[in-house]
Image: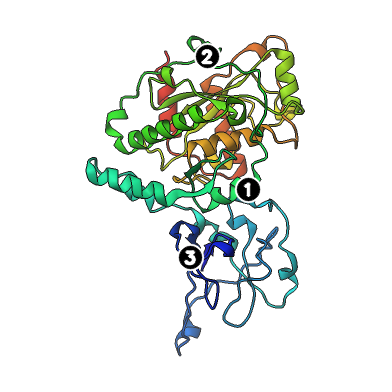
């Protein structure tokens, strides 16, 4: 069973079969196997049928519902879809419509969600050896991944099936024509953590190539996009360690409680730190807030920022990450979370503590606790991130 982008108007043909000329619009999901019973079948051990009830099912196109061999409708549990994808589809917990009332639907097992860990074939190209062949492959990969208009920027960007659909619902992105008080270069980088290039950098050619490509893409986007509409800023002239980035998020909607708190505090941006391990992009980056401090969730805060400053998002764990995700998508995910109003994010205005930066140790501890509590798989690079922090002293 394959999933395809729901845009029949752009298919080559829809009758009598769907014909699609964009391979990146097609994602293999499940393999169905027909079992031929034999005289020995009854003697074989067979697992009991699962009685677990799904919290909801994916809403399918009512004109093209998935039907099995016996004309039974096949229902796909929402738990099989990564959280970021469910948000993009607007189906975070809703039950999937009239299909649930049909007789004898085929319910795909919730455990089949593991099948949806998407490791795109582009990784083979990404980790290819240097030379002209690699350059040719890289261009091919970029062409295959340019599938949708990204974040309202009017420029085609690397994407995959999931993020291509997510672009339709970017509520956290600044709108065109937005004005801003943010001024690039106002951040005192000398006051922030500074790490030497890790000792394992030279032995991580795949990560270096991926990061170098991201830097080039992001530089192009930043130089060609209105600052207020972009919503993030990187001082590339000061980026001297490819495995350690400082990113500022700015120009939030003035109606957000977070934006109002920032204005009162004289804060023009949220300062993020990104750290990459040697296995990037197989593993996600570690993302945390350095400053300002946020009101903890236990005290009424929100924004998916842990008490230690780490970003609490399934996307940044092995459970929700895909190597095909661009770092611009990561920025957008963090921004969308900060703009979430359930509950809204607030700055911590407590005396003393509110003016202190988060440190890396409390961020890592808080991230581990949050991921464990949610049942998300912690990236193996977390230990490498910890070793990078030890270089600070």
Alpha carbon separation for disc pair 3 and 2 = 47 Å
Alpha carbon separation for disc pair 3 and 1 = 21 Å
Label number found at residue 216: none
Of all residues, the one furthest to the bottom in this rendering is 39
Whether residue 348 is visible: no
Point out the tag, 3 or 2, that comes first from the N-terminus: 3
Decide: few, some or many residues near mark 3? Use Cα within 10 Å; few <14, some 14-19, many ≥20.
Answer: some
Closest to the observer, 139 or 90:
139
Point out the tag, 2 or 1, that comes first from the N-terminus: 1
* Residues at circles 3 and 1 in contact by the CB criterion of under 8 Å: no
Label number found at residue 168: 1
Residue under circle 3?
Answer: 20
Alpha carbon separation for disc pair 2 and 1 = 32 Å
Q: Quadrant of the C terminus?
A: top left
Q: Residue at x 31, y 34 (%)?
A: 204
Helix, strand or loop at mark 3: loop
Q: Residue at x 59, y 55 (%)?
A: 81
Left or right placement of residue 229 versus residue 322 in this view: right
Residue 25 lies, in percent from the top left, at 49, 58
Residue under circle 2?
Answer: 185
Q: How is the image coloured?
A: rainbow
Decide: few, some or many residues near mark 1? Use Cα within 10 Å; few <14, some 14-19, many ≥20.
Answer: some
Helix, strand or loop at mark 2: loop
Helix, strand or loop at mark 1: helix
Above/below status of 371 relative to 361:
below
Closest to the observer, 258 or 46:
258
Left or right placement of residue 31 versus residue 77 in this view: left
Point out the tag, 3 or 1, that comes first from the N-terminus: 3
Residue 187 lies, in percent from the top left, at 55, 13
Q: Residue at x 51, y 41 (%)?
A: 155
Quadrant of res 154: top right
Q: Residue at x 63, y 35 (%)?
A: 173
């Amino acid at each position: 069973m394959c999933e395809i982008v729901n845009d029949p108007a752009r298919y080559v043909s829809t009758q009598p079969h769907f014909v699609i000329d964009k391979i990146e619009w097609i994602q293999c999901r499940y393999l169905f196997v027909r079992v031929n019973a034999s005289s020995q079948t009854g003697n074989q051990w067979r697992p009991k049928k699962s009685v677990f009830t799904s919290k909801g099912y994916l809403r399918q196109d009512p004109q093209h519902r998935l039907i099995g061999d016996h004309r039974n409708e096949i229902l796909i549990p929402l738990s099989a879809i990564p959280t970021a994808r469910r948000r993009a589809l607007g189906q975070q917990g809703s039950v999937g419509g009239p299909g649930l009332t049909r007789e004898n639907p085929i319910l795909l097992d919730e455990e089949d969600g593991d099948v949806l860990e998407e490791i795109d074939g582009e990784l083979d190209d990404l980790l290819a050896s240097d030379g002209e062949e690699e350059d040719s492959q890289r261009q091919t990969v970029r062409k295959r991944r340019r599938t949708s208009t990204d974040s309202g920027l009017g420029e085609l960007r690397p994407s995959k099936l999931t993020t291509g659909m997510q672009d339709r619902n970017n509520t956290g992105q600044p709108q065109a024509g937005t004005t801003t008080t943010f001024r690039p270069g106002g951040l005192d980088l000398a006051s922030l953590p500074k790490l030497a290039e890790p000792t394992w950098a030279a032995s991580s050619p795949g990560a270096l190539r991926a990061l170098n490509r991201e830097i080039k893409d992001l530089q192009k986007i930043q130089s060609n996009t209105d600052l207020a509409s972009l919503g993030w800023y990187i001082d590339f002239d000061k980026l001297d360690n490819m495995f350690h980035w400082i990113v500022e998020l700015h120009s939030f909607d003035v109606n957000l409680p977070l934006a109002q708190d920032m204005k009162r505090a004289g804060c023009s941006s949220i300062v993020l730190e990104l750290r990459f391990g040697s296995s990037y992009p197989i593993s996600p980056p570690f993302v945390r807030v350095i400053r300002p401090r946020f009101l903890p969730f236990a005290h009424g805060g929100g924004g998916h920022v842990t008490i230690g400053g780490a970003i609490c998002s399934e996307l940044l764990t092995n459970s929700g990450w895909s190597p095909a995700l661009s770092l611009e998508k990561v920025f957008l995910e963090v921004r969308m979370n900060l703009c979430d109003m359930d509950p809204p994010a607030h700055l911590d205005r407590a005396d003393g503590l509110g003016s202190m930066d988060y440190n890396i140790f409390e961020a890592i501890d808080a991230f581990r606790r949050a991921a464990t509590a949610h049942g998300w798989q912690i990236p193996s690079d977390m230990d490498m991130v910890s070793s990078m922090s030890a270089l600070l002293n």
